[in-house]
Each structure stands twice: as structure tokens, then as C-alpha cells.
Image (cartoon, coloured by chain):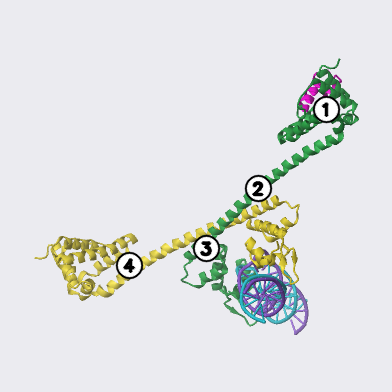
Chain colours: A green, B yellow, C cyan, D purple
Amino acid sequence: MEYTVQKLGRLAGVSARTLRYYDEIGLLKPARTNSAGYRLYGPAEVDRLQQILFYRELGLSLERIKEIITAPSFDRAAALREHRRQLLARKEQLDLLIKNVDKSLAALEGRMTMTDQEKFEGFKRELIEENEQKFGAEARAKYGDAAVDRSNEMLMGMTKEQYDRFVQLGEELMQTLKAAFATGDPAGELAQKAADMHRQWLAFTWPHYSKEAHAGLAQMYVDDERFTAYYDQDQPGLAKFLRDAILIYTGMAN
Amino acid sequence: MEYTVQKLGRLAGVSARTLRYYDEIGLLKPARTNSAGYRLYGPAEVDRLQQILFYRELGLSLERIKEIITAPSFDRAAALREHRRQLLARKEQLDLLIKNVDKSLAALEGRMTMTDQEKFEGFKRELIEENEQKFGAEARAKYGDAAVDRSNEMLMGMTKEQYDRFVQLGEELMQTLKAAFATGDPAGELAQKAADMHRQWLAFTWPHYSKEAHAGLAQMYVDDERFTAYYDQDQPGLAKFLRDAILIYTGMAN
DNA sequence: GTACACCTTTACGTTGCGTCAATGTCAACA
DNA sequence: TGTTGACATTGACGCAACGTAAAGGTGTAC
């Protein structure tokens, strides 16, 4: 049986181009060519191709394969051992690459958390600037520059965990306050819990706590429309309710 | 400071060709070119080259590197993770290759030992044919076809280990014999030891031992010039000496 | 002025084919 | 016997990342 390029290709699972290339580099020459120049392969060539593909599967270069299957006395075992050595070297090289990529990734992710850190610092700074813009003048007039600066420093000195807790406590305060508001009783358990949470929340930025200051701030929530707007945004009357609760909490309701 | 291709190349450890190539593919363009067309690189390009080489060390393609360092918002971590995935895939591929090469090597070495086995069989066959050619007629006349055939069968039936021992014993016999020859006394301890070793050596191919046959063979070493030539090749008189020792050993000296 | 190191562009070689392009051939069917 | 469609041929470019000439222009030091 004789095979043309395509037939042999289908038989062995390679392209016709591959066979022509193998012919070109002298790796596998056809048994003969017909008058039109068609390559015709016989059984011997089929066998040789199988051998070629076997070594190709092992990753040897065509040049090497040519040596191995052309010279009958070629030491195949030695060639394979050498090939194995090269493969192992490539594997080591790869392992090294992977290790370095891992290290770079770790550094990158490290930088990412640094970036998070920077973002967090940015948040704090933004919050302070916002506060300064909104209430800076009044706050400094009322509490003095030193107190405000000290408060800002406390904020900036927070770790991320402290800051997160600060933000979270603020949210919990709001929820508790709303629940208390629903009861309508500023002296009730929920409202007093909200007042206590407000004290805790203040402690994050107030260096020294005093009932008077706490009550004074509560009054400001009602007097200053910017605060009122913040607390009343969902529930009208919430700022007043919080003030009443705090006045009772601090014992300054009378 | 401005650098020409070669200076920057030396600085960064790459060839001038590489820099020209990087320019060509738009990966690293010089800051400017002078009137003669010389590429001139500035500090910014040095930095960029460092980045390029960093990613190149990690095995990324230049195309990929271009993407990473050209687009400022490119997610380097994601790119590295993807690259890592590819490296791992290549590593698995390599491991598979190595495994297959190992298997092929094992098969080959298996065949090699078979070949050794065949070679060994060949040695035995050669030895028999040699013996047959040299002494076949006489031996068959003297001991009978059955005895000679039986002897040959014993040889062919040897394992490699037995055969090796047979050859080794023959060499040791020769050494002992020469040492004994130096003493000049065929009745001495060394000579008698050589005679005993000769008996052991015969046992490999002789099914039945008898003093008479042993003494007869010893006499043949002297009578047949082919044997004499073999034993006397280094030391003239060695065949005669061996015969005398064996005659004494078998108690047939009188 | 000249020597010598350095620069430029152009272009081929590397590996193992994939993929056109232009063109010729085989086998079967109408 | 002509046509058609599947197949064949050679030739060429392309891929990645440069190495390596070749042919010719520059910079600079003596």
C-alpha cells in the first residue's frame, strides 16, 4: 500500500505540511515520487514516521530525532538521558520563575494592602476636612483650637481596626436610635442605650468626657440645622429625640 | 545624563540589538534622536527598561510587558496570576514529558539488559563453536558425542552469574598457576591449590568428575600443541607444570 | 588627517510548522 | 470527453526574541 501526504497524515495524525517539512529537512523522505511529483510513502516510511512521532512526543527536537533514528548505532538511551537532563533543567528554571512570580505577587499584594492603608488614611483625612469645613469655625469657637486639634489627632491616630469600629458603632447607634424613636420614649431602655452608644462613639474623638459637654453637643444637634438635617434625614424629629435621651442620660433633663 | 544604545545596554545588561528591537516593537522608545539618528535615552527610559527587565525575568512575553507597563491602570497582580497559571501549566506539561521519558528509558534499559542477555548467550555460543572447531573432533572421539553435547548443554544452561564465575575462576586459576610455577614445585601448596581450582573449573562443564579423566585431560594439555600453546603463551613449561601438579593432585603420579 | 570605536538600517537565521497563493493532477461522473 | 472537486506541488511569509553579519555613516582622541 502506498500513501500520499494527506493519507499518511491522516493515518498518523499529522498534517500534510508536516510531512512535506519532514521531507524538506531530510527527516522522512518518501519512498518514491510519481511522474507528477507526488510524494508516495510505503510501509517502511510509516514505521519510520511512527518512530519520529514517538520521540517527538517526548519533546526531542527534530534534529535530535534525525540523529537517533538515522544512525542505527546511535545510543538511544544516552540520548534520552541527556534529554531528560535538559527537561529537568527546564523544570528547575520554571520552578525558579514560579517562585519569583510568587514573590512578586506577594510584594504586589503587600503594596495593595499598603494602598488600602493609604486609602484608609485618606478617608480619615477627608472626614476631618469635611468636619472642619462644616463645623470647624463653630467647633473651634466653642471648644477651642486645642480641643479640636486634639480630636483630629485622635482620629488620625486610629488604626484601621479602631476606625472601622468607630464607623460601625456610628451605624449601630443610628439603628438603635431609630428603634428607640419608634417607642417614642426618650427615657426608655432603648433610647438610653442609644445615648450610651453615643457617648462611646464620642470617646473615639473626644479626649475627655463630661456630662456637660455631652449635653451641650446634643443641644447643638438641634440648634444647628446641619446636624439636624443629618439626623432627621430619614426620620423627622430624630435629632430632638436624641437630645432628649442624652439630657436624661446625663441627668441634665431638669 | 543621556545614554546611547551601547551605554544603556551595558548599564542594564542587555545588548544594543535588544534595545533597537525594543524600539522597533514600540516597547521602549528613546527620549530623542540626535541629528545623526543616534538613539538617546534619558533617566525615564532607564527606569522603564528596569521595569521591562523585571517582568522579562519573570518570563512574561514582551507583548504582555508592553500592556502592563504602558497602561497605568493595568492590573499587574491579575496579569501575574494569569502568568503564574500558565507557568504551572507548562510545568505540568514538563512533568508529564519527564515521566514519559523515564518510562521510555526504563523500557529501553529493559531492552538493553535483554541485549546484554543476548550478548551473553552469544558469548557462550561462540565459546562452544570455538571449542568445537579446535577440539571438537578429538573430544568427541575421546569422550563420545554424548559427553561433549552434555558439556555444551551445561555451558548454555549457565546463568550469567554462573558464566561470570566460570570465567573468573579461569582467570584466578591462571594466576595461581603462575605463582605456583614460580615456586617450581608441582607438589607444593600453591600448585595443589591450582590443581584443585582446575577441578572446580572443570565442574562447570563436566557432568561427572573422575580422577582418571582429570589426569587424562592434564596429559592432553601437554600432548596437544594447541593447549600447550595456550598455557605456555606467557610462561614456557606451564602446561607441563600443570599436568604434573594435577597428576600429583589426583594421586596418579606414580 | 586618520584611526578606531561606535552608530545606523537592512536582512537573514533560528524552530516547527500554519496558512495563503498560484498552479498542476487525479478520479469520478455526466 | 469535458468538467468538477478534491488533492498535489512549490514558494513564500509569519510567529518570538533577538544574534549576527554587512555596508556605510559618526564621534572623538591623538
Q: Residue under label 4, please give it.
A: B124
Q: Image quarter for residue A150?
A: top right
Label 4 – label 1 distance at C-alpha: 113 Å
**Amino acid marked by disc 2:** Ala
Q: Which numbered disc covers residue A107?
A: 2
Closer to the camera: disc 4 or disc 1? 1
Between residues B117 and B37, which one lies in front from this camera angle? Answer: B37
Chain letter behind tag 2: A
Closer to the camera: disc 3 or disc 1? 1
**Amino acid marked by disc 3:** His
- In the rendered image, residues at marks 2 and 3 fall on the same chain: yes
Question: Where is residue B174 drawn, in percent x and y?
Answer: 23, 66
Range covered by the magenta-colored residues: A178-202
**Amino acid marked by disc 4:** Lys
Between residues B1 and B210, which one lies in front from this camera angle? Answer: B1
Q: Is residue A200 magenta?
A: yes
Tell me the residue at 85%/27% (across/down): A142
Q: Is residue A240 above or below residue B7?
A: above
Q: Secondary structure at mark 1?
A: helix
Q: Residue under label 3, please give it.
A: A83
Q: Residue under label 1, please give it.
A: A143
Between residues A226 and B242, which one lies in front from this camera angle? Answer: A226
Q: Is residue A245 above or below residue B142?
A: above
Chain letter behind tag 3: A
Question: Where is residue B1 drawn, in percent x and y?
Answer: 70, 61
Q: Is residue B241 above or below residue D10?
A: above
Closer to the camera: disc 2 or disc 3? 2
Indicate the quadrant containing the C terminus of chain B: top left, top right, bottom left or bottom right.
Answer: bottom left
